[in-house]
Amino acid sequence: MTSIHRLLDEAFAGIALSPDVQDLKEEIRANLAARAAELEAAGRAPDAAAQRAVEELGDVRALVASWLPETAAPGDAAPTRPATAFEEHAAAWERHRVRPRPGFAVRATLLPLIALAGLLPLALSIGGVLELSLPVQLLCAAAVALPLGVVVGDALHQETSYNFAMPLGRAIGFGTASALVIAALPVAALGLRHGWGWFVAGAALLVVGIPLFAYLGATQTNRAKPWARSSWMQQEWEHPNRFTTDQNAAARFGIYTAVLWIVAIVVFLVVGFVGAWAWSWLALVGALVVMLLLLTRMMFGGKPGGED
């Protein structure tokens, strides 16, 4: 269905969605879904079935033109002023508005509360105020990271007014990477009470989580819906950045970030192993500063599509 939604929105791009046209679009959507299901049952892959169903539909503009009523004769209505860019965008947003699903709203409220319930006793335990065993501390760390990772993946898998829903597998990947990075801090903090080995464990979580983030970000395609990509915000009001106009720049940033953090974590571990844990954290801070400077340079510097 995600492919059907995307292809249908692209077919209707640039067509004013009056109530009648919106009804026609929803009717076409149902027919396309049924036809795609038939093609899948015949052995086609889901994406290929959706593409074939849309191709069989033919010229959408001609179909809409045949559906629309005759244009009113001149003088039947008083002339109106042209709509402003803001009004056009507001009307388009209202037509394409997608309301959050109730289940997602409930999960997005309850899961952070679970994370907070795990964070408070863990912080008190690490600070020496509350005595908890190591297994309980690890359980609290998991209670912090896992719910927040689920929230990230769940949010990306939801369709919004501006973006298509991210495929489930990729959303799970982002959620997993988020959980690993979030878990790195409480796990490393256990080193304050249980030895330097937990610092290494926290760093290991970062070694896995950050490159996973970089890979997912570098391979992500544009999820913005056609109407949003052509909206007044991107054309007139938003300051253009490299990542919206040059996907290669986004891919390079992901690769640079992965290499940067791998080197920083290796330096962190090497300096720590030689006994200078008090200074090893500077490698991570330095990597963060370099990454932010690199992000600024790649988003707003140079020419789109050019060399950095």
Image (cartoon, rainbow, N blue to C red):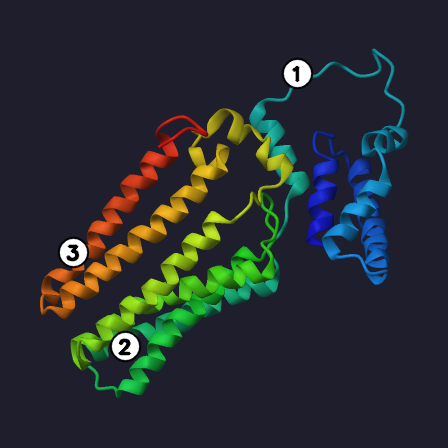
Front residue of 78 and 278: 278
Q: CA distance from mark 3 to mark 2?
A: 25 Å
Q: Amino acid at mark 1?
A: Arg
Examine the rendering and report whether any part of residue 139 can be seen. yes
Mark 3 surroundings within 10 Å by alpha-carbon count, few (fewer than 14), some (14 through 19), many (20 or more): some
As helix, strand or loop, the secondary structure at mark 3 comes to helix
Q: Decide which of tag 2 and tag 1 comes sooner along the chain.
A: 1
Q: Residue at 14%, 63% (x, y): give it.
A: 271
Front residue of 283 and 116: 283
Question: In the rendered image of this protein, does residue 291 appear above or below residue 203?
Answer: above
Please name the residue that numbered disc 2 is placed on.
Answer: 122
Mark number, residue 162: none
Q: Residue at 60%, 57% (x, y): give it.
A: 167
Q: Decide which of tag 1 and tag 3 comes sooner along the chain.
A: 1
Please name the residue that numbered disc 1 is placed on.
Answer: 81
Examine the rendering and report whether any part of residue 189 can be seen. no
Residue 116 lies in quadrant? bottom left
Please name the residue that numbered disc 3 is placed on.
Answer: 282
Residue at the top extreme?
75
Q: Residue 169: x percent and y percent?
A: 57, 62
Q: Residue at 86%, 53% (x, y): give it.
A: 35
As helix, strand or loop, the secondary structure at mark 1 comes to loop
Question: In the rendered image of this protein, does residue 179 appear above or below residue 11?
Answer: below
Q: Amino acid at mark 2?
A: Leu
Circle nearer the viewer, 1 or 3:
3
Q: Which quadrant of the rendered structure holds the N terminus?
A: bottom right
Q: Residue 220: x percent and y percent?
A: 52, 48
Front residue of 275 and 243: 275
